[in-house]
Image (cartoon, rainbow, N blue to C red):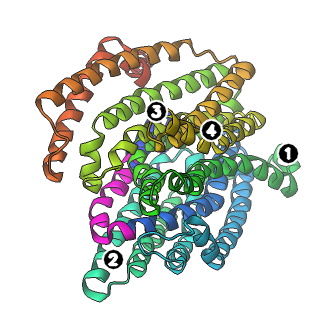
Amino acid sequence: MIKGDYVKKDNFLKGAFVATVCLVLTKVLGILYVIPFYNIIGSKGSVLYGCAYNIYAVFINLSTIGLPLAISKLVSEYNTLGYEDLRKRSYQMASRIMIITAVISSIILFVFAPNLAYFIIPDMSYGNTVNDIALVIRVCSTAIIFVTLISMIRGYLQGMKYIRASSYSQVIEQFVRVFVIIFGSYFYLKYVGKNMSIAVSIAVFGATLGAIVALMYLSYKKTKIPKVKNYKINSEEKKVTNKELLKKIITYTIPFIVMGLIGSSFELVDMFTVVRTLTKYNFSTETASVIMNIVTTLGSKLNVIITAIASGLVVSLLPNLTSDFVKKDMKEVRKKINRTLQIVIYITLPMAVGLSLLAVPVWNIFYGASEYGPKVFQVSIFIAVFSSISTNIIVVLQSLNLRKSLYISLFAGFVFNAIFNIPFMVWFEKVGLPIYYGNLVATMLGYALMIFLALFDLKKHFSVEYKDTLKELLITIIAIGVMSIVIIIMKQFIPIDHLGRITSIFGVGLYALVGALVYFVITYKTGSFNKIIGFKLRRKHENRNS
């Protein structure tokens, strides 16, 4: 084998950086394609696409969210202990379970597509019928098996701390998917026919083709992992039977499945409540459907720029924190918990504030002028911050085997949102606030409850102190406050709320550059940037080694 052919392992910060950059690029592609795609399919196609894809997301979570992360945790645990045989056995067993689950999910989604379509919007808007949505859902079902396979290999590579190969595959998958979405739907509507359900079906089939190409890349990379030679199974590994190993896999998997389902269920609660509640308060079904689509689909697509940062951290956090926990290095565990919180807050909070202040031009860039889009988005973007923090903290609980705390946190947050979604909307209407802000606030408070309960249990079980994180949060808020003032003053002299799409891009770019510069200078001068990102720590470490 030629030197350099093997894939290389990544440490926590490097892995987090690579994973985050690739995920952000993937999510940016997932947002940018919306501009031409929305122009190609229009409002009718957008509603159709959003309804079908949200249902698909729940089923793909069932097949992929749980086991890949469980594989990552198991592989990291056994790799740290040096248990080569258990590492291989756990991966093979989990893979079989994933394939069976994927096949079952795909069949259920295909067979019951009409039933699921009916429950989304009983009074179909924009002329979409149950059959239209059912067709798109059935096409989505073809992606489940392939997406499950690539998620399985990604989980294995992440557990072995080969973060780059896993991350690059996501970019490849997204490039192929976006290409099919844009050019497939355009070609059909331009040269073949005018049936919107077929055009959208071609677009969602991009997920299947993207997964196939990514699977080919990952399969090749997996063959490049260095083999362990002359390994002998020790007595501890022999004691672990397949039955015990299966029990452990299930124990590790269930929390991730619950986490993924509850994450998707927040949007499903909106899908089943927003339209029905708005129509009771003098909103037409068409307008209510548009607002629901903004909340659950269009706004969420913009939110992923922020949530991608959380996902990137999770990819590196899970195997590294599991490894520290197995080695009983509690000092490093506490350090990584606080570092994760600080990084998420430091990056996501100013991004959310900036996007909120620039909601009108940002929405105009991606979707064009809209009566409700910017109004909803300027509040809904903050859900991404709460979601990002909760995602990482819940993964911390799983990494440290605090499964009871994990379940309590997840269900408490979800139940709060499910119970108070409609009451908050009604209350907002009564006090004169936009009714559609009620469900957004209920969602944020649900996530906040999750975070509070999780942090409380981490302090209780592992003596995690948050004083440094709170101090960094205060500095971050002050820096954001100054940044916001600068942006507001700029808007008085350089208004960008009523510009065209192209000029809005340059305007938002200018504001983003100035805002980011102000924020960075303040946090750098206060030492917050170096402390959170770790530049000073890295230089000291290098000096000690030299």
From mark 2 to mark 1, how far is it between C-alphas? 56 Å
Quarter-wise, where is residue 455 in the image?
top right
Q: Which residue is located at x 47 percent, y 62 percent? A: 285
**Residue at which label 1 appears:** 235
Please name which of the two marks, 2 or 1, marks the residue nearer to the observer.
2
**Which comes sooner in the sequence, label 4 or label 1?**
1
From mark 3 to mark 2, how far is it between C-alphas? 39 Å
Range covered by the magenta-colored residues:
24-45
Image side of residue 404 versus residue 66, left or right: right
From mark 4 to mark 1, how far is it between C-alphas? 31 Å
| Labelled pair 3, 1 in contact (Cβ < 8 Å) | no
Quarter-wise, where is residue 392 in the image?
top right
Q: Which residue is located at x 47 percent, y 31 percent? A: 344
Image side of residue 329 versus residue 541, left or right: right
Q: Residues within 10 Å of mark 4 (few under 14, many from 20)?
A: many
Quarter-wise, where is residue 377 in the image?
top left
Please name which of the two marks, 4 or 2, marks the residue nearer to the observer.
2
Q: Residues within 10 Å of mark 2 (few under 14, many from 20)?
A: many
Q: Position of residue 357 (x, y in %)?
A: 30, 33
**Residue 520 visible to an observer of this rendering:** no
Question: The disc labelled 4 sits on which kind of residue?
Answer: Val
**Residue 268 visible to an observer of this rendering:** yes
**Which comes sooner in the sequence, label 3 or label 4?**
3
Q: Secondary structure at mark 2?
A: helix
**Which comes sooner in the sequence, label 4 or label 2?**
2
Give the numbered dot on residue 13: 3
Q: Residues within 10 Å of mark 3 (few under 14, many from 20)?
A: some
Q: Number of marks in the image?
A: 4
Q: Position of residue 449 (x, y in %)?
A: 63, 31
**Residue at which label 4 appears:** 395
**Residue at which label 2 appears:** 184
